[in-house]
Image (cartoon, rainbow, N blue to C red):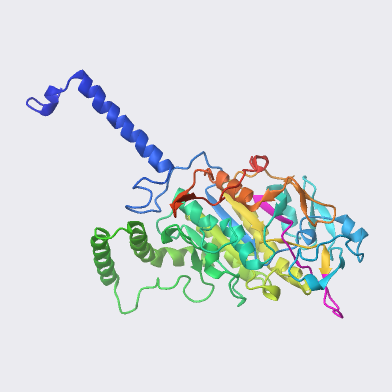
Amino acid sequence: MGVKGSATDLWTRRDFLSRSGGGLGMVALSHLLQQEGLSAGTLGSGNPLLPHVAHVPAKAKAVIWLFMNGGPSHVDTWDYKPELAKFDGKAYEGFDKETGFFSKEVGPLMKSPWAFQKYGESGAWVSDLFPHLSQHVDKMAFIKSLYAVSNNHSPALFMMNTGVTKMGHPCAGAWINYGLGSESQDLPSFVVMSDPLNRGLPKGHALNWGSGFLPGVFQGTWIRSKGDAVENVRRLKSMSDAQQQDQLRLIHELNEFHKTRVSAESELSARIHNFELAYRMQTAMPEALDLGTEPESVRKLYGLDETHCGHFAKQCLNARRMVERGVRFVQIYSGGMANDRSWDGHKDIVKNHGGFARETDQPIAGLLADLEMRGMLDETLVIWGGEFGRLPVSQRKAGAAVSGRDHNPEAMTFWLAGGGVKAGVEYGATDELGHRAVKDRVHVNDLHATVLRLMGLDHKKLTYLHNGRRMRLTDVGGKVISELIA
């Protein structure tokens, strides 16, 4: 009964059941709207990066994507093809010279310059390029039948990052941010580190980690290797902390007032959130990137003080520290612009792949070992791969003394580790020469669907209404590779 004289004194049992039923209906409606990404709490109000409930129980809490930019050769790294040695120097009968990018520089079949050996209890074949990573094959799940749809770097990069070959679409990290929110309110939820050795950004630049038609708050934050890690975050020397707080408070009030007068509420909310996050990052980002607190044993594990790999070791260690502090998605690029400045081994694959493998082998192996020792590997999904593979034939100009390999969209190898991945397994296969994926072919959309599933997201439910269509990372395709999930 209500207070005497109140309206609730007049409730009948039918009124009570009616009002209770209406409340349950609103709860159900709210749940359905959240599933469709239409509830107000998803984007339009408050902090859009507050943690969201996953669609299904998640295997992983964070992703570290190690992007070998330029297209590493699968037949020289993880996909052993003894037939290439058998037919070395012979013409590849029936080969379509338009498969690669340089149709006028197609040579004969070429064996790998590196020897392969079996490692681990799984007996995985690994080339001599990776003396450190070869010790961790029992943690890895290899996808040996992944293929792309473009033989050109920019569209292939867009495909691998966003699921389509066109620019302007959200990348995987942005979709995961949109679907799950952030575990850290003091650091960006999505961080990108590019090659620091003056090699430039990958082709397509920041579009590879952009949010596309999703609100800007979900895009990646690029961490610079020199100077301030993030531009425009450091407080001016002429401004005190109290003055800056007053400034941010005024900006917030003006933006909130402006929100009541415009329809583009989600974009303005993202801008407000970015101002507030930038303020908190002034303290949190320097602390996260301060490697001086790491013990000597960790520095040696990653090769932090080694001349040949110290730059990439720093980024791998930063990735672990970021994930440790709640960052959801970290992407690290090895190699910058095309050709000699990336894994794009057209001219001299021995020098090209040998150099980049030496830079990355120990740091990545150190990352896997470090994550495992800290009990973080089970909840951190580590991904290794590029935008396409390379051809089994040589690429050589007339009179050239050395050979390389051209682009191959028909086949590439990726490996995944941790984060609920079934360890020590291989999925799919290429033909005997490593030219095409032939067994259990894996489209990039399938890879994305599997990554989302490991993060607790259903790729068919993770949608965003854009131009009258419910868009998703996997477009109209995608199949979860259940054989890779533990």
In the displayed structure, 8 sits above or below 183; it is: above
Is residue 409 covered in magenta? yes
- Is residue 351 shown left or right of residue 485? right
Horizontal placement of 388 versus 175: left or right?
A: right
Residue in the image at 56% along x and 51% along y: 475
For image coordinates 53% across by 58% down, the residue present is 171
Residue at image location 58% in from the left, 59% down from the top: 161
Q: Quadrant of the C terminus?
A: top right
> Splitting the image into 4 quarters, where does residue 285 fall?
bottom left
x and y percentages locating residue 362 in the rendered image: 69, 62
- Residue plotted at (74% across, 47% down): 428
Q: Residue furthest left?
A: 5
Please give the range of residues in magenta.
395-417
406 is higher (above) or lower (below) than 375: below
Residue 439 visible (yes or no): yes
Quarter containing the N terminus: top left
Locate residue 404, reporting x and y percent: 80, 71
> Which one is in front, 48 or 29?
29
The one of 234 and 415 positioned closer to us in this rendering: 415
Q: Which residue in the rendered view is the most extreme toward the front?
A: 468
In the image, is 339 to the left or to the right of 473?
A: right
What type of secondary structure mainly makes up the magenta span? loop
